[in-house]
Amino acid sequence: MEKVDWLYFQVNLVCLMIMAKLWRTVFYDYKSQYESRLFSYVLLSTTIFTISDAGWIIFTSLLFPGNIFVNYLVNIVYFVSSAFIGITWFWFCEFILGFNFKKNKALLIILHIPFLALFLMSLSSPLTHYIFYIDDANVYQRGPYHMLQVFCMNVYFIITSIQGIIRLFDKNEIAMKKKYISISTLILWAFTAQMIQVCIPGYPTIEIGLVMALFSVYVELRNSIISIDQLTQINNRTQLLKYLSQKFKSFNGNDSSKNLYLMVLDVDDFKHINDKFGHMEGDFALKLVADSLKKVAANTSCFISRLGGDEFVVVTEKENDKLAENLSETIRNQILKDSSNTEKQYKISTSIGFAKKDTHNATVADLLKSADEAMYHNKQKHKKQAD
């Protein structure tokens, strides 16, 4: 095997090793997630694609009876799997982005035409030479419609990247922003790598681009699944933003007797507790607040989450501001009660501010900002009263 062929094989082997790691984690950790199942289809298509490419470089270098037939077979698998890479990426991204093309059957059929065209041209290439053919010297040659194969595969990357960019401009999709960015930049990895291989044959840059795209999306997939704050065992920031995004989509104050309220809680003098009594006591204080919130949430309809640091969030639906104020007082009193029942040298209290979803707080970011400002105002008021 020539030096360039050996390098080609090694690159494919490294890509397969990376995908093997992804396979192991996806299979054991996320096999019950529909999102991960769709991701596994992409991973399977890419794995077969890479194996066939590695096999091609081996069988091209070997001389044995029927080697041309085997070379044809390997290349058919290669191009058919490239068709499946495109369509499985499309299925996966459609689910992530929330574009349900199944409702429009005509559009769904149109969107599957590139896949079907590439699939059929790949299978028929030994006879038609449309995409590729193997010459008498057992050397792979590109067919007259090879660039059509490039288009049919990459059109799905282009479509989903455009969709991801569109979703990025939705201000209520904060929780999904990183996923949308990874999908939007998919074209930079996959399409750019394929263009390099088209211009400079003999180097497996497509596999590198696909694996980088897979890894990028996988990281966001894993991060989004981890939704529980490890210290307090309540919802974390990622889960909060996802919940708010869903609420903003479904909630319409004009059609409901209730309003959507968001409360931000901050532990008073938390830095003092950390500095004087140590970080273990600081962690205890955070867990106590979380446990108090769980007690309140058990008796009321609300969503609780740790925002980060010593800040917590409660999301609830109430008829008016007075009822929201009553809930905030219930939370403060529960925390004070639980703190009093401990034998600690300090008492835990909180400052709470809340905001209502309305025309001034039309986005998730606006609502969080307004509630945070209200909390800060109340904290300053508590400090003045203490002085």
Image (cartoon, helix red, strand yellow):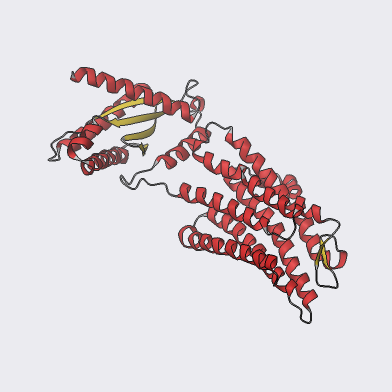
- Name the quarter where the N terminus is drawn: bottom right
Q: Quadrant of residue 122?
A: bottom right
Q: Is residue 255 left or right of residue 50?
A: left
Q: Nearer the viewer, residue 1 or 170?
A: 1
Q: Please name the residue shown 31% across and 24% down the image.
A: 325
Q: Please name the residue shown 36% across and 45% down the image.
A: 229
Residue 248 at x, y percent in the picture: 50, 32
Q: Please name the residue shown 75% across and 71% down the image.
A: 60
Q: Is residue 84 left or right of residue 140?
A: left
Q: Is residue 259 visible in this depiction of the protein? A: no
Q: From what the image shows, is residue 50 above or below residue 90? A: below
Q: From what the image shows, is residue 4 above or below residue 92? A: below
Residue most extreme to the front? 3
Residue 339 at x, y percent in the picture: 18, 36
Q: Is residue 119 left or right of residue 366?
A: right
Q: Quadrant of residue 370?
A: top left
Q: Is residue 153 visible in this depiction of the protein? A: yes
Residue 135 at x, y percent in the picture: 85, 69
- Name the quarter where the C terminus is drawn: top left
Q: Please name the residue shown 41% across and 46% down the image.
A: 227
